[in-house]
């Protein structure tokens, strides 16, 4: 009988849960099992009372709660839990998601991240609030985690560039593995009407995902494309602008909501989400799987997903640039051509493809 590899996916949060790391851990576990790998989910979340006490103690030295998750005390306790879980388990390798814990010596592992701390400090509302002392300590501990890993896997070339430039990780130890679509949408391109232009936005965090600038650019677009429409899904405020349809928060686990999401992707001619920062942007893959081109942010990983032909990337602070991108994608021939390219590119970003890349990095 051939040997079945036994791996663990480790994270703070239940790796089996669809909400952990935006579905990344669940997607990796599902794909590894489909490839015949025996897997275990290693949740390093501490019991509620213990977690609260540890985080309070960890935040005390700097009096900054944003330091607590990555403080030395928190990491020591989580690392101890990881050692206990792995002892005698027969686990032959680990995919470590995040860097707020360390794995025991001798355990082969690869890290998996969508953004480095240096990038987060510059643009992310949580990391930018950490104290200088907290950042310095976490950076020192992260350097050790990177150094002991077999490979440092990242979702995009944007994150890979930071590992190389900011952390000195050698290029041959960096693997760009991408991420997969959690809810791919199949829609026949031949059934799609490419006029009038129908834009679609999906994002829970309205401000960070670029909702306000999108509304302003769309209002201006209506001056030259009066029949253009914009469907908005997520945590948006009340919307009363002409041509804009707000749908609020929709849940994939509710059949009626799921049916509406599929319908919106099936009739859209362009997906647009000009996030202030977008570490990866799995929703761009979901749009591409439906044959819909995207307009995404130039800050983060969307450039990898969109490529050179599957849509456009724009500076999230450039309203004029966003307007021009929307004007271009309002042209039926351009939208159709880029939609076909996006569908083709989406085949690179499935969880089985990601799992295969992770296995190569680990082995």
Image (spheres, rainbow, N blue to C red):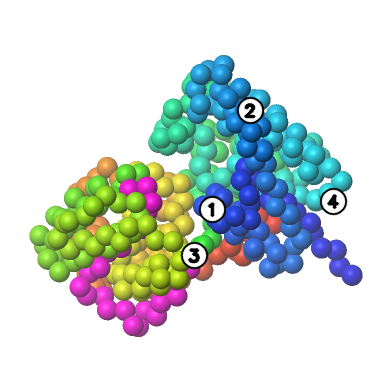
How far is disc 2 from disc 4 in space, using C-alphas?
A: 29 Å
Q: Residue at x 57, y 54 (%)?
A: 24
The N terminus sits in image quarter: bottom right
Q: State yes or no: discs 3 and 1 in contact (Cβ < 8 Å).
A: no
Was residue 193 drawn as part of the magenta stretch in this picture?
yes
Chain-order first, disc 3 or disc 4 = 4
Residue 201 visible to the viewer: no
Is label 2 in a helix, a strand or a loop?
Answer: helix
Q: Quadrant of residue 167?
A: top right
Q: Nearer the viewer, mark 3 or mark 1?
A: 3
Say above or below: 296 vs 133.
below
Badge 1 crowding class, 10 Å Cα cut-off, few under 14, some 14 to 19, many 20 or more, is few
Q: Residue 17: horizontal and vertical position, in percent?
A: 59, 55
Q: Which mark is residue 54?
A: 2
Give the labeled residue for mark 1: 19
Q: Residue at x 63, y 52 (%)?
A: 15
Q: State yes or no: discs 2 and 4 in contact (Cβ < 8 Å).
A: no
- Looking at the image, the residue that sits furthest to the bottom is 190
Give the labeled residue for mark 3: 253
Q: Which mark is residue 90?
A: 4
Badge 4 crowding class, 10 Å Cα cut-off, few under 14, some 14 to 19, many 20 or more, is few
Was residue 76 drawn as part of the magenta stretch in this picture?
no
């Amino acid at each position: 009988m051939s040997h079945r590899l036994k791996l663990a996916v480790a994270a703070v949060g239940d790796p089996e849960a669809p909400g952990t790391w935006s579905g990344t851990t669940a997607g990796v576990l599902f794909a590894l099992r489909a490839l015949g790998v025996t897997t275990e989910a290693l949740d390093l979340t501490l019991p509620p009372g213990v977690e609260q006490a540890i985080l309070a103690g960890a935040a005390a030295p700097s009096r900054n709660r944003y330091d607590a998750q990555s403080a030395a005390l928190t990491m020591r306790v989580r690392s101890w839990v990881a050692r206990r879980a792995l002892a005698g388990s027969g686990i032959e390798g680990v995919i470590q998601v995040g860097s707020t814990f360390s794995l025991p010596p001798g355990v082969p592992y690869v890290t998996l991240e969508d953004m480095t701390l240096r990038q987060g400090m510059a643009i992310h509302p949580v990391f930018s609030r950490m104290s200088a002392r907290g950042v310095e300590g976490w950076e020192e501990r992260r350097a050790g985690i990177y150094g002991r890993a077999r490979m440092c896997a990242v979702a995009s070339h944007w994150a890979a560039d930071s590992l190389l430039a900011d952390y000195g990780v050698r290029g041959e130890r960096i693997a760009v593995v991408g991420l997969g679509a959690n809810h791919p949408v199949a829609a026949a391109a031949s059934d799609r009407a490419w006029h009038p232009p129908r834009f679609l936005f999906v994002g829970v965090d309205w401000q960070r995902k670029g909702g306000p600038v999108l509304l302003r650019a769309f209002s201006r677009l209506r001056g030259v494309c009066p029949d253009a429409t914009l469907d908005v899904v997520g945590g948006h405020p009340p919307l009363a602008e002409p041509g804009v349809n707000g749908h609020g928060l929709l849940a994939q686990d509710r059949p009626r909501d799921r049916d509406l999401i599929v319908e919106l992707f099936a009739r859209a001619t362009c997906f647009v989400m000009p996030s202030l920062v977008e570490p990866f942007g799995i929703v761009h893959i979901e749009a591409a799987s439906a044959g819909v081109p995207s307009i995404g942010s130039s800050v983060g990983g969307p450039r990898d997903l969109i490529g050179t032909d599957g849509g456009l990337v724009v500076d999230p602070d450039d309203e004029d640039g966003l307007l021009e991108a929307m004007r271009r994608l309002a042209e039926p021939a351009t939208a159709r051509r880029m939609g076909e390219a996006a569908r083709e590119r989406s085949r690179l970003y499935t969880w089985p493809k990601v799992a295969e890349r992770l296995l190569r990095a680990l082995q």
